[in-house]
Image (cartoon, rainbow, N blue to C red):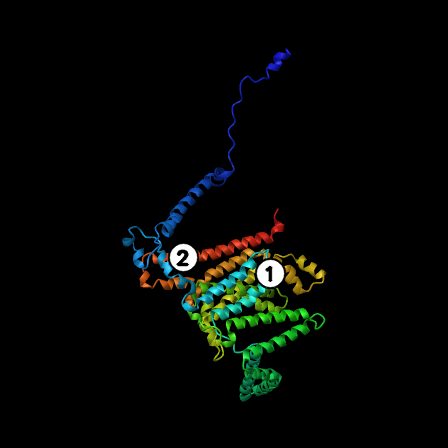
C-alpha cells in the first residue's frame, strides 16, 4: 500500500515551459518600460517621433545635406546654379565671420580682441576647475585686474596721471562745486544767503585741507615722466598705509608685501601697454560689435549684478527701516520696467541729468543699466535662498560669538547661494540672451551684426536670412547650454552631502 501511495505523487510527464521574463534592461527594455508601457505613453511617443521627424530631419537637411559649402558670392547659393534645392549658404557665414565676431572693429587692431579672449579663457578656466589651487589669486586677477587690462586693450588710450592726481582732481572738483553752490545761494534772497555763506566758508576750508595733495599733484605734473612719478608716490603712500594699518613692524609686513606685489603687477601692465606714452590707439565703442559686444555686455552684467543682488537681498531683510525701504523700492522699480525701457533711459535720457561737459560712453551707460536691472532680479532669487536658511544657523553663530558680517559671509550666504544655483543660472542665461536688445540703442551685438550683414547685395539669396539666424542660434545655444551643464555640475558637487 505504501508503494502505491508513493507512486501517486510522482509526475509522469514533463512540466510545460514558462514564458520568458519581460526584458527590462538594454534598449528593448528601455522601449518597453519607458516609451510603450501604457496607451498614453504610446500615443505620446508616436506624437513626439512625428514632431522630431517633421522638425529635426528638415533642419539637418537644410544645415548639412542640402547646404552649400564653397563659393565666393551669392551665385553659389542659388538653386539654378547648384542644381538642387539649396539649403544653408555657409560661404556667406565664412565671408562674414569676422564681422560676426568683431563687428566694425578695425582689422589691424583685432589682435587686441583676440588677446582679450585668450586672457579671459586662461583666467576663467582655472576658476571653473575645482581641483586647481590658488583660487583666491585667480579670482582677484579675473574680477579685478582683467577688467582694467581688457579696457585698455579694447578701448585703447593711456594714462595722464595716477592715484594722487585722480584723488586731487576729484577733491578739487568737489570743492569747486561746494564753493559755486555757496556763491549762488549767497546771491539769492531770503534766508538762503546764510546757507550760502556757510557753504562758501566750507569750500574755503576744504581748499586748505587738500592743498598738500594739490601741491603734490602740481609737482608731479611738472616732472619729466608724470605718470611714473604719480605711480611711485601712490605706491609709497598706499604701501605705508597698509603697513601701519596691518600692525606696523609687528604684523604689517604681510600687508606691505601684498601691496608692493599689486603695484608691481600694475607697473608691468603700464609698461607692457605703454600707458605712460599714450597707450594703444583708441577704438570708439561705436565700432565694437558682434560676439565681442555680446560677451562684454553679458559677462559685465553677470559679474556686476551679483554683488548688487546680494546687497539688495540683505538690505531687504535688514532691520534698519531706511535701508529696507530703499532696497524694496529699488527692487520693485527695476523689476517693474522692461529692459528695453532701461536701455532707452540709460542711452538717451541719462545724459540730460549729467553736469555740463560730463559725458559717459554709450556702451558704459548700457552696461550700468543692465547691471542694475539684472541685480534687482538676482536680489529676489538670493532672498529666496536666505529665507530657506533656518534661523538656528544664525543663532548658533551668535552663540559662538561671530559678528553679523562673519555669520553672513561664512555661514548664511554660502548656504543660500547653494540653494539658488538653478535660479541664478537661469537669470544669467536669460541675461545672455537679452543682450540682443542692445541693438535697439545702436549697439551691434552678435544678432545685430548678423542682421546688418543681410543688407550686403553680394550675399543676397533666399537662404541667407535663415543661415545667419541659424549660425547665431548655434552660438547662443553653445554658451547657454554650457552654462546650464556647468551649473548642474556645481550643484551636484555642492550637494554631495545630500546624496544617498
Residue at x 51% of width, y 73% of height: 274
Q: Characterize the local packing of mark 1: few (<14), some (14-19) or many (20 or more) Cα atoms within 10 angstroms.
A: some
Residue positioned most to the left: 80
Residue at x 69% of width, y 60% of height: 397
Is 253 drawn above or below residue 410 in the view shown? below
Query: Where residue 406 appears, x then y in whole percent?
Result: 66, 63
Mark closest to the chain's N terminus, 2 or 1:
1
Left or right of 396 on screen, residue 447:
left
Q: Which residue is mark 1?
A: 135
Local SS, label 1: helix
Is 164 drawn above or below residue 33 in the view shown? below
Q: Nearer the viewer, residue 192 or 380?
A: 380
Local SS, label 2: helix
Q: CA distance from mark 2 to mark 1?
A: 35 Å
Q: Nearer the viewer, residue 456 or 411?
A: 456
Is residue 57 in sight in this rendering? yes
Q: Which residue is mark 2?
A: 471
Q: Characterize the local packing of mark 2: few (<14), some (14-19) or many (20 or more) Cα atoms within 10 angstroms.
A: some
Query: Where residue 442 appears, x then y in whole percent?
Result: 41, 68
Query: Where residue 377 appears, x then y in whole percent?
Result: 53, 62
Is 367 drawn above or below residue 394 in the view shown? below
Amino acid at each position: 500500500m505504501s508503494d502505491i501511495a508513493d507512486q501517486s505523487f510522482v509526475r509522469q510527464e514533463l512540466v510545460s515551459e514558462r514564458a520568458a521574463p519581460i526584458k527590462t534592461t538594454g534598449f528593448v527594455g528601455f522601449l518597453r518600460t519607458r516609451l510603450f508601457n501604457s496607451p498614453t505613453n504610446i500615443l505620446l511617443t508616436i506624437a513626439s517621433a512625428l514632431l522630431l521627424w517633421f522638425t529635426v530631419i528638415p533642419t539637418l537637411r537644410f544645415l548639412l545635406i542640402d547646404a552649400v559649402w564653397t563659393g565666393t558670392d551669392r551665385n553659389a547659393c542659388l538653386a539654378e546654379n547648384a542644381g538642387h534645392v539649396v539649403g544653408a549658404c555657409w560661404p556667406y557665414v565664412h565671408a562674414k565671420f569676422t564681422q560676426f565676431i568683431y563687428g566694425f572693429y578695425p582689422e589691424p587692431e583685432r589682435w587686441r580682441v583676440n588677446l582679450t579672449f585668450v586672457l579671459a579663457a586662461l583666467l576663467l578656466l582655472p576658476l571653473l576647475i575645482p581641483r586647481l589651487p590658488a583660487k583666491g589669486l585667480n579670482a582677484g586677477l579675473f574680477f579685478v585686474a582683467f577688467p582694467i587690462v581688457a579696457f585698455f586693450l579694447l578701448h585703447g588710450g593711456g594714462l595722464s596721471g595716477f592715484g594722487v592726481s585722480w584723488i586731487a582732481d576729484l577733491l578739487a572738483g568737489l570743492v569747486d562745486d561746494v564753493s559755486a553752490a555757496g556763491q549762488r545761494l549767497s546771491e539769492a534772497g531770503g534766508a538762503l544767503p546764510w546757507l550760502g555763506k556757510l557753504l562758501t566758508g566750507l569750500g574755503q576750508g576744504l581748499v586748505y585741507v587738500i592743498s598738500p595733495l594739490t601741491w603734490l599733484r602740481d609737482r608731479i605734473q611738472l616732472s619729466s615722466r608724470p605718470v611714473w612719478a604719480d605711480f611711485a608716490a601712490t605706491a609709497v603712500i598706499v604701501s605705508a598705509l597698509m603697513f601701519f594699518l596691518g600692525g606696523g613692524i609687528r604684523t604689517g609686513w604681510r600687508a606691505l608685501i601684498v601691496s608692493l606685489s599689486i603695484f608691481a603687477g600694475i607697473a608691468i601692465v603700464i609698461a607692457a601697454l605703454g600707458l605712460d606714452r599714450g597707450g594703444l590707439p583708441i577704438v570708439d565703442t561705436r565700432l565694437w560689435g558682434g560676439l565681442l559686444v555680446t560677451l562684454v555686455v553679458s559677462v559685465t552684467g553677470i559679474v556686476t549684478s551679483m554683488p548688487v543682488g546680494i546687497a539688495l537681498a540683505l538690505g531687504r531683510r535688514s532691520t534698519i527701516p531706511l535701508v529696507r525701504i530703499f532696497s524694496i523700492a529699488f527692487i520693485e522699480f527695476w523689476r517693474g520696467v522692461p529692459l528695453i525701457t532701461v536701455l532707452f533711459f540709460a542711452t538717451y535720457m541719462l545724459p540730460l541729468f549729467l553736469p555740463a561737459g560730463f559725458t559717459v560712453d554709450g556702451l558704459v551707460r548700457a552696461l550700468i543699466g543692465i547691471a542694475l536691472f539684472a541685480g534687482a532680479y538676482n536680489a529676489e532669487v538670493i532672498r529666496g535662498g536666505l529665507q530657506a536658511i533656518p534661523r538656528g544657523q544664525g543663532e548658533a553663530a551668535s552663540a559662538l560669538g561671530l559678528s553679523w558680517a562673519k555669520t553672513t559671509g561664512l555661514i548664511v550666504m554660502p548656504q543660500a547661494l547653494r540653494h539658488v544655483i538653478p535660479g541664478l543660472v537661469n537669470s544669467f542665461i536669460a541675461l545672455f540672451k537679452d543682450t540682443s536688445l542692445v541693438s535697439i540703442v545702436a549697439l551691434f551685438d552678435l544678432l545685430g551684426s548678423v542682421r546688418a550683414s543681410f543688407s550686403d547685395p553680394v550675399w543676397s539669396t533666399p537662404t541667407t536670412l535663415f543661415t545667419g539666424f541659424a549660425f547665431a542660434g548655434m552660438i547662443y545655444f553653445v554658451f547657454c547650454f554650457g552654462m546650464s551643464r556647468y551649473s548642474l555640475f556645481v550643484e551636484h558637487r555642492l550637494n554631495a552631502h545630500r546624496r544617498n
